[in-house]
Image (cartoon, helix red, strand yellow):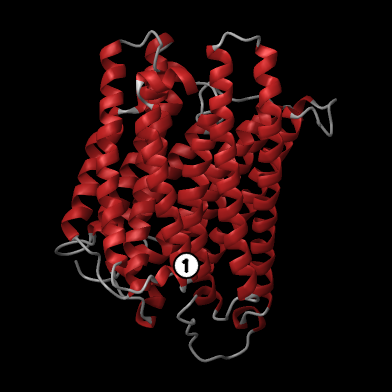
Amino acid sequence: MPTATDSPRHEHLVIERLVFWYFAAALGYMLISMVAGIIMGLQLLSWNPLPALEHLSPGRWRMVHTNAIAYGFLANGFLGMLHWVVPRLSLRPVLDKRLSYFIFAAWQIVVLSTAVGLILGEAQGLEWGETPVWIDPLAQVGLLLVAFDFGYPIIKVKGPMYVTLWYFLAALVWTFLTYAMGNFIPQYCVSGSAAGAVGGLFIHDLVGLFVTPLGWGMMYYFVPILLKRPMWSHGLSLVGFWGLAFFYPLQGIHHFLYTPIPMFLQYGAVLSTIALEFVVLTVIINFVGTLRGTGMACLSNLPLRYFYTGITFYFLTCLQCALQTTMTFQALIHFTDWVVGHAHMVMFGVFSMWQLGMMVYLVPRLLKTEWYSEKWCYWHYWASAGGLCVMAGDLILGGLFQGWSWAALQPWEKSIEVSIPFWAVRIAAGAVMFWAQLLFAYNLFKTWQKSPLRTGEETLPHVAPATM
């Protein structure tokens, strides 16, 4: 597979200012999401700072927490990444720069309006699809515009395409269809167990057909550039793509095992989930094989360290997923904090770490200057990865104790008592992760302040150091 280049001759194709705006917005939503998570965590420990305000109730802030990560942080980060990668690989600009600026402004309005609607109690009754009904049409139109803006340069590519563009083009189509399925069909078309089946499909496809293809495509672009070598196996990259396309849409019902949904659908979801883990394993092997013979470059190259830390968490997450979707294990951990730990490990440990690593790599190139403090970037990495290890491990272990308490038919209060120490550790780990993102955001701000693009100074073309 050919290696993508990162040369200055492509800079005229990229709206670099807009890429930076997306990254700044993404970090802002990350901080909002973490504040919501801390508020909710404190309430579980009976430390509600404002108990008289129903708008700060755990249920509402839990939805703000998850939606700000999915549609605020991850979506903004991916949109910024697409503006950098797609023009460079297709050798064409986006469909219309004015449309790109409009999408940026419109998407921030959609995300902020969603947060306001959730706090005011206007959520839909669907996990990950809580977006108020008056926001859904706007979001759907926005996704269509995104598909046009980035799909146009991709479909104009002559000859073989990079695998990265395969993933991006598929994600543009899949995301539009997945959002429509999850936010309109259960609301207006079906009910009961049928709505549960569609809801389960939406929950998992939002991760598998929106976040995953964009994340994998991003990795297939940046890792070869940072290692200055092609991917280990082009064939495995194709296996990963087609395996994702075939198996991922079949497994959503594993979120609703032991429900009135027909058992053949539940068993099918379990089998497809286990099959997908083998597909994911091929992707992990491909990236590990690409690293082979480089002297463990991820130890000296900070963006690579983020990327390969995410790959490590990916392996652990998928191994865990193949176990927890079996009927036997699901009976123990369903509705426990094990699931919460699993979700944090994949959404923060994998995809957020990948995006943060991408920002560490691209921000100096966008602002034409070094990071204000390289040391702070390392602190951010260790606090983020270390805090996530503690949080995920704590919640996974706490979930086992909760499940054993329920299986022993102990009173509900006993499971609460056993959970409190784990919830306290989660707050401490979350505070460390929150501090890390504050530090990273401040580092980004100080880097922007000294950027020649802001001061108007004339500088030579910027070249980032090998370790960053």
The one nearer the camera, 122 or 446, is 446
Looking at the image, residue 379 sits to the left or right of residue 213; the answer is right
Using the rendered image of the protein, determine whether residue 93 is visible from the camera's viewpoint: no
Q: Which secondary structure lies at badge 1? A: helix
Looking at the image, residue 146 sits to the left or right of residue 290; the answer is right
Q: Which residue is mark 1?
A: 303
Instruction: Give the residue type that dot 1 points to.
Output: Pro
Using the rendered image of the protein, determine whether residue 102 is visible from the camera's viewpoint: yes
Q: Residue at x 49, y 23 (%)?
A: 333
Q: Position of residue 142 (x, y in %)?
A: 46, 44
Q: Residue at x 53, y 26 (%)?
A: 400
Image position of 307 with respect to 144: above or below = below
Q: Position of residue 77 (x, y in %)?
A: 50, 55
Image position of 149 with respect to 368: above or below = above
Image position of 66 with respect to 434: above or below = above
Q: Quadrant of residue 231?
A: bottom left
The one nearer the camera, 283 or 57, is 283
Q: Position of residue 194 (x, y in %)?
A: 37, 13
Looking at the image, residue 86 sits to the left or right of residue 347; the answer is left
| Mark 1 neighbour class, 10 Å CA radius: few under 14, some 14 to 19, many 20 or more | many
